[in-house]
Image (spheres, coloured by chain):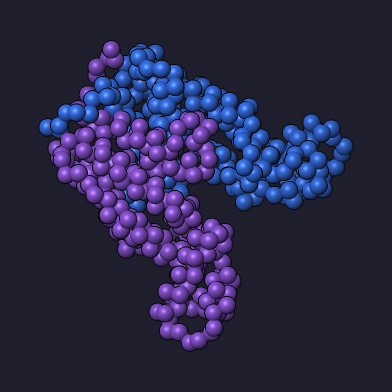
Chain colours: A blue, B purple
Amino acid sequence: MARRVDHSPDELKVMILDAAEDLVMAGGVSELSARKIAQKIGYAPGTIYNVYTNIDELILILNGKTLERLYDHLSMVRLDGEADIGSANENLEKLLIGYLAFIDENRSLWRLLFDHVPSSEDDLPEWYNQRVLKLLSVIDQVLLPLLSGRGAEERRDVSATLWASLHGIISLADKKKLDVVISRSSHDVCSLLITTFLNGLKDHADFTGKIQ
Amino acid sequence: MARRVDHSPDELKVMILDAAEDLVMAGGVSELSARKIAQKIGYAPGTIYNVYTNIDELILILNGKTLERLYDHLSMVRLDGEADIGSANENLEKLLIGYLAFIDENRSLWRLLFDHVPSSEDDLPEWYNQRVLKLLSVIDQVLLPLLSGRGAEERRDVSATLWASLHGIISLADKKKLDVVISRSSHDVCSLLITTFLNGLKDHADFTGKIQ
């Protein structure tokens, strides 16, 4: 247990957040409790509720931090600037590899990001939504050259659809539910989706022709 | 509490399974405990472990039952027999509507199917895998006319990829994490994926052409 000293509310906020992050990293979401955090920072459990409204608020801020770290991680991926499907495919493949590497290193935090459903029905705060959208903008940028003829809302719909689909594949694999239906890695399944999806963005509206 | 009588192990298995199903339907996964099941059937909690190895085995059998009910539900969807992309699109749209309706009526059981990760590392039993694959065969059938030039394994990969992607979208929506990135319903996002994916199955290997 750390030696107890007096800290300002701002200092406590950071200490509690760091302790929560360490606990999740080390033992998963189930490790996250006011008691364990308090023990780690050398304060009484009640201290946590002096600086955070409840555990949901703490998790939201921790998830916000994970989103920011993920964005920083993906921003470092060097993308190709050509405006064709081949380049978009390569760029998405690079981002996918970066994303999977991030998950490998931060699996418990990544799970917390998606599996935790807050008990309150309140809308997510605007700053949190902005971080999610900033992350999605990484895919937006890659798809932009392929969607130049479409409006901003349609472009966003396309990016979000691709992202949600990739998330689904990775999430099923994480829960060991992908290998029942397919004997390939989550990376390979994501690649197949990316390739097919990008190909499908060409002459999108043409569904009249018979096959073969 | 039901009046306690003597039941055969086979009768107890069914009673326990039904009680577990009722508990999950009524209050979600968190309601599932040996104590609550025992209370419902009027036996001591230990009785459950006379006929099921543990709660994981009970959940596996309950999930198997849900898979079978979902298959029966989707089998009743009337599909169009034409072998073109338009028909495949319509058929997948009908299956999607059927799937979403099933989830609406059986949300807690559907969540149990995907969110529960058994504590044991054992492989799933063969009968369970067969039920999952039987369910996936519904999508296989719809895609078959579009993939006649490909091998069985590749066809299965394509079906599984589409299914996993759709699952991802629906699952994000269920956790209220889809509306942060897209202001459309999970149905609309799934439709967008289906349309784009099917379009992408045409001349799949052509990734050389520049856009526009």
- x and y percent of residue B44 in the render? 57, 79
Residue B201 appears in the figure: yes
- Badge count: 0
- x and y percent of residue A36 in the render? 72, 49
* Up-down relation of residue A51 to residue B30 (above or below): above
Residue at 81 percent across and 47 percent down: it is A46
Question: Which quadrant is home to the C terminus of chain A?
Answer: top left
**Left or right side of A126 for A83:** left
- x and y percent of residue A84 in the render? 32, 16
Nearest the camera: A134 or B36?
A: B36
Q: Residue furthest right?
A: A6
Residue at 49 percent across and 44 percent down: it is B174
Q: Residue furthest bottom?
A: B6
**Left or right side of A27 for A53:** right
Residue at 61 percent across and 36 percent down: it is A123
- x and y percent of residue B99 in the render? 36, 48
Nearest the camera: A99 or B1?
A: B1
Quadrant of residue A198 within the rendered picture: top left
Residue at 40 percent across and 39 percent down: it is B187
Residue B154 appears in the figure: no
* Up-down relation of residue B172 to residue A65 (above or below): below
